[in-house]
Each structure stands twice: as C-alpha cells, then as structure tokens.
Image (cartoon, helix red, strand yellow):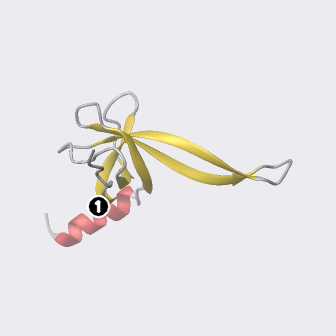
Amino acid sequence: MSAEATDNAQDQRGSRRVIVGTVTSSAMDKTIVVSVTRRVRDRRFHKFLTRRTKYKAHDEKNTAKVGDVVEIVEARPMSKTKRWRLLRTVKAAVEVLS
C-alpha cells in the first residue's frame, strides 16, 4: 500500500480523539487505567469543579507505569470496556528510592 493510499484511508476513517491523562493502574496484563481530569463550570453556582474520567487503554508492551503522563487514542473495541490504545508516554513518573 502506498503512502497516498494510507493517507486517503486515514481521511476516510476520520480523525481519532487523542487524550492526555495520568496512569493510575497498570496491574492488568497489556491494559492500563488512565485518569483524565477536566474543569467544568457549575450551572447554578458558577463555580469551577474538577471532574475525572477513567479510561482503560491497551498497552501492548506493558511499558506504562503508575504516575506516567500518557497520550491515548481512540481505537476499535478490544473488550467490553477497553476502547483506547496507548499512543506514547509524554512524561515518565519520578521513581522514589526508599
């Protein structure tokens, strides 16, 4: 498949959402849990509130660690709750020596 054909296939499929979040769990095999926080304004009191959403993402090589800041991208459904794929690690977590 040529580069032009690949680009056309990508355009037809549409752009996929990319989200940045923090890894909160990596205990499952090839799966990470990513927490994404956002700020929303309360409709009644006009106060800004922090809301969190947790996504399960596919990590093929088990490279992500708890505390890493990662980018995840939409993907085809891989299981009942897993619909995201690890794109890259933006910032690695700081390892604390005891």
Q: Nearer the viewer, residue 80 or 14?
A: 80
Say whether residue 3 is left or right of residue 84: left
Residue 65 appears at what percent x and percent y? 28, 45
> What residue appears at the point 86 percent right and 47 percent down from the top-left corner?
44
What is the total number of numbered labels drawn onto the structure image?
1
Say whether residue 40 is left or right of residue 68: right
The image quarter in which residue 89 lies: bottom left
The image quarter in which residue 98 lies: top left
* Residue located farthest toward the bottom when viewing the structure as drawn: 4
Residue 73 appears at what percent x and percent y? 37, 53
Residue 27 against residue 55 in the figure, above or below: above
Residue 67 appears at what percent x and percent y? 37, 48
Residue 61 appears at what percent x and percent y? 17, 45
> What residue appears at the point 62 percent right and 45 percent down from the top-left corner?
51
Residue under pointer 1: 9
Q: Nearer the viewer, residue 9 or 59?
A: 59
> What residue appears at the point 40 percent right and 56 percent down from the top-left corner?
16
| Residue type indicated by callout 1 | Ala
Element assignment for label 1: helix
